[in-house]
Image (cartoon, helix red, strand yellow):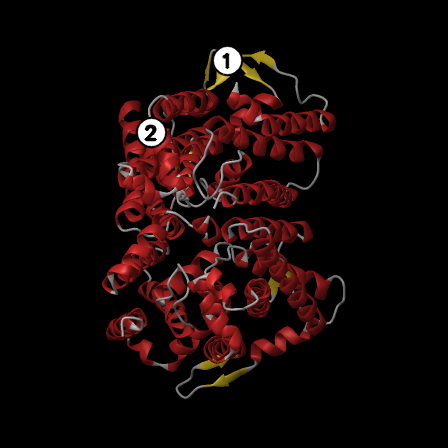
């Protein structure tokens, strides 16, 4: 019960927030707003799925925003300047991102480096590579892009479920199945619980850690593709700071930052709550956009406090473990030594 | 002497970067005296590197306790906004007091979350990193506030016996921090807390107070960096002041050879690390290479330093394991 509490709270908060907005602005009850909420949250949602995997596995990935930026600028140049067909360019960038993530995972595992600093270097590297490709925004005029932006599923009531929103929902569904119903998913939870215990159980820790970071970068590249489809352009400055939005969404969705616990339903709700705040501020019109940052910060604080509270309630042994984990990052190997 | 020997690799790296800068730009090491202060590319390295050096003074202590402070860039923006909005109506001590006090409050908030609520440092400081820029924009009301106060401007563009004020402030803070943590047992307690918080608490160290203090100090250093940055451009830009500087500060601490897991630190090496980063920055600008290369170079440096540290960590844990 206490395990599902954060997700329940996030769901209630979203419902209450949505209801409050609906009483203020009746337009919220149309499918048009729902469709926009999904479309606007599409690329953040895809990134957040990867972030959820990494965080459940006890890691963190700060490079995702830069990978999104690199992807958009690479696609724009590949399609417009180098004449590569869009679908081939998608394939190339997904493969490159997968390798990039795998390399970070390998560094983290083989050299036993903190994931935070390795992915920080990855963040610099991917952003720098994007800037070296082009410092300007490059428009994409490929026919595929025009076709995709027209492609959408009409919802009753005038709303549209765009392809990008569909991709996001698909990623959440597939991710949910992988996380809950496959051996890889079980391993991800186990890794977040304890890397050492997992290794002692006979799981090949290294290849799974590599896979988790490869997946995160792969999904970031997919989010980059979605971003470039949405904006029909590529700029190395796109998606700055998205890694933090994704982490915030994951936390609001009840995934424990110390790893081992959480799920994608919560992350989906976290992304939607963020989108709801943005939409409400847009509807209001008088509030400045910086209020969304403050509101996100407050929510982040409230949900982390909730996490701490529920973990403390879960038992004294749980609290003791958290107490040492909260003050220092104790790595299993060192704790043993 | 011991400190100097421990810092030999960093010092050599710094000199190598300066030499490389001299090779790409022959005028690099020229320093001349003009209008009562020193000018030149070399002086500029120290001048431009000052904000990150100030940040790294706070960051290195936080990292020494096994924590991290992601909010320093946002705190810089808040303090800059406070200073700029008061600069033309209040005397300098009030302006400085308000800005530094705000930074101290921000640091205490971070410390409270980490030490009392026991939230992981990355997440605890993420909150202020996200919300901080919003708060700064709230103070500036979304505009870029400019000011004309010569007193405040002196902190950014002035000079004391020829040395630019930002560099003077860095030296002052370095001496003050050294006196506080190395002149007392505080430094030892910080390292103990980072090494093993539980054991330190059992040994009678108030780890909670130590943790609270380092985050507060980090907030104070960040606020001073924010004031210097605002004084430098005669204005406060809530969106861009200190943007991504938290990463540079962490990089400086990594370059200084402090373990990111806590337990050991060196203040003067962290400051040297900040200037090393700025020297690379300036070198790339002077050489005419695309400035965007900077990020790639930084990434390469982080990885190289970590790889250098890694076998040492492995050797250390082997040594520890042998007796048992």
Real-space Cα distance between discs 1 and 2? 34 Å
Q: Is residue A195 visible?
A: yes
- Give the SS element for disc 2: helix
The residue that mark 1 highlights is: B162
| Relative image position of residue A161 (x, y in whole percent) | 48, 81
Q: Name the image quarter holding residue A156.
A: bottom left
Q: Residue at x 43, y 82 (%)?
A: A159
Q: Nearer the viewer, residue A167 or A199?
A: A199
Q: Residue at x 35, y 39 (%)?
A: B193
The nearer-to-camera label among 1 and 2 is: 2
Q: Chain of mark 1?
A: B
Which residue sits furthest front?
B324
- With B96 as the anchor, is A73 left or right in this view? right
Q: Chain of mark 2?
A: B
Q: Is residue B91 visible?
A: no
Q: Residues within 10 Å of mark 2 (few under 14, many from 20)?
A: some
| Relative image position of residue B134 (x, y in whole percent) | 35, 50
The total number of labels drawn is: 2
The residue that mark 2 highlights is: B186
| Relative image position of residue B199 (x, y in whole percent) | 33, 42
Labels 1 and 2: the sequence-earlier one: 1
Q: Nearer the viewer, residue A170 or B322?
A: B322
Q: Residues within 10 Å of mark 1 (few under 14, many from 20)?
A: some
Which quadrant of the figure contains the N terminus of chain A? bottom left
Give the answer, above or below, for where A34 lies relative to A44: below
Assess whether mark 2 and mark 1 are in contact (beta carbons under 8 angstroms). Answer: no
């Amino acid at each position: 019960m206490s395990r599902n509490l954060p997700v329940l709270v996030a769901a209630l908060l979203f419902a209450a927030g949505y209801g409050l907005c609906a009483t203020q602005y009746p337009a919220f009850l149309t499918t048009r707003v729902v469709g926009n909420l999904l479309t606007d949250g599409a690329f953040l949602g895809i990134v957040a799925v990867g972030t959820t995997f990494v965080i459940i596995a006890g890691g963190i990935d700060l490079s995702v925003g830069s990978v999104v930026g690199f992807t958009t600028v690479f696609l724009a140049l590949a399609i417009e300047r180098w004449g590569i067909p869009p679908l081939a360019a998608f394939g190339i960038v997904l493969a490159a991102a997968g390798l990039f993530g795998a390399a970070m995972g390998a560094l983290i595992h083989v050299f036993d480096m903190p994931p935070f600093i390795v992915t920080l270097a990855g963040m610099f590297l991917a952003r720098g590579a994007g800037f070296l490709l082009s410092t300007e925004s490059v428009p994409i005029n490929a026919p595929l892009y025009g076709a995709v932006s027209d492609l959408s599923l009409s919802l009753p009531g005038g709303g549209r479920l765009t392809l990008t929103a569909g991709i996001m929902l698909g990623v959440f569904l597939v991710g949910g199945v992988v996380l809950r119903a496959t051996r890889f998913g079980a391993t991800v939870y186990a890794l977040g619980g304890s890397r050492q215990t997992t290794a002692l159980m006979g799981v090949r820790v290294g290849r799974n850690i590599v896979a988790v970071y490869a997946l995160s970068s792969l999904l970031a590249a997919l989010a980059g593709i979605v971003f470039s489809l949405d904006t029909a352009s590529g700029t190395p400055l796109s998606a700055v700071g998205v890694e933090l939005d994704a982490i915030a969404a994951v936390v609001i969705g009840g995934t424990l930052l110390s790893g081992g616990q959480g799920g994608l339903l919560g992350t989906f709700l976290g992304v939607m709550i963020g989108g709801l705040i943005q939409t409400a501020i847009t509807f209001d019109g008088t509030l400045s956009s910086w209020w969304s940052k403050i509101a996100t910060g407050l929510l982040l604080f409230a949900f982390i406090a909730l996490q701490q509270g529920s973990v403390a309630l879960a038992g004294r042994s749980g609290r003791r473990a958290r107490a040492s984990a909260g003050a220092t990052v104790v790595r299993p190997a060192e704790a043993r030594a | 002497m011991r400190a100097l020997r421990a810092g030999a690799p960093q010092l050599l790296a710094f000199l190598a970067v300066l030499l490389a800068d001299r090779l790409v730009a022959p005028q690099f090491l020229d320093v001349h005296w003009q209008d009562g202060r020193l000018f030149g590319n070399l002086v500029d390295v120290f001048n431009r590197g000052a904000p990150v050096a100030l940040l790294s003074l706070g960051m290195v202590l936080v990292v020494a306790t096994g924590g991290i402070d992601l909010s320093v860039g946002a705190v810089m923006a808040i303090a800059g906004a406070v200073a700029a909005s008061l600069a033309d109506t209040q005397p300098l001590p009030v302006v400085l007091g308000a800005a530094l006090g705000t930074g101290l409050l921000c640091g205490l908030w971070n410390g409270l979350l980490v030490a009392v609520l026991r939230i992981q440092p990355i997440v605890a400081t993420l909150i202020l990193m996200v919300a901080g820029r919003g708060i700064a924009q709230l103070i500036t009301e979304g505009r870029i506030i400019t000011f004309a106060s010569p007193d405040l401007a002196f902190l950014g563009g002035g000079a004391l016996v020829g040395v630019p004020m930002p560099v003077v402030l860095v030296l002052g803070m370095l001496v003050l921090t050294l006196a506080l943590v190395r002149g007392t047992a505080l430094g030892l307690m910080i390292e103990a807390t980072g090494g093993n918080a539980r054991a330190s608490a059992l040994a009678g160290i108030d780890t909670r107070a130590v943790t609270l203090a380092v985050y507060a100090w980090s907030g104070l250093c960040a606020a001073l960096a924010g004031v210097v940055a605002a004084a430098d451009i005669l204005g406060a830009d809530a969106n861009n002041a200190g943007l991504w500087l938290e990463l540079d500060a962490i990089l400086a601490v990594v370059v200084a050879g402090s373990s990111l897991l806590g337990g050991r630190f060196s203040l003067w090496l962290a400051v040297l690390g900040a200037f090393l980063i700025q020297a690379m920055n300036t070198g790339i600008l002077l050489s005419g290479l695309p400035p965007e290369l900077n990020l790639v170079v930084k990434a390469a440096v982080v990885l190289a330093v970590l790889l250098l540290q890694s076998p040492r960590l492995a050797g250390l844990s082997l040594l520890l394991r042998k007796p048992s």
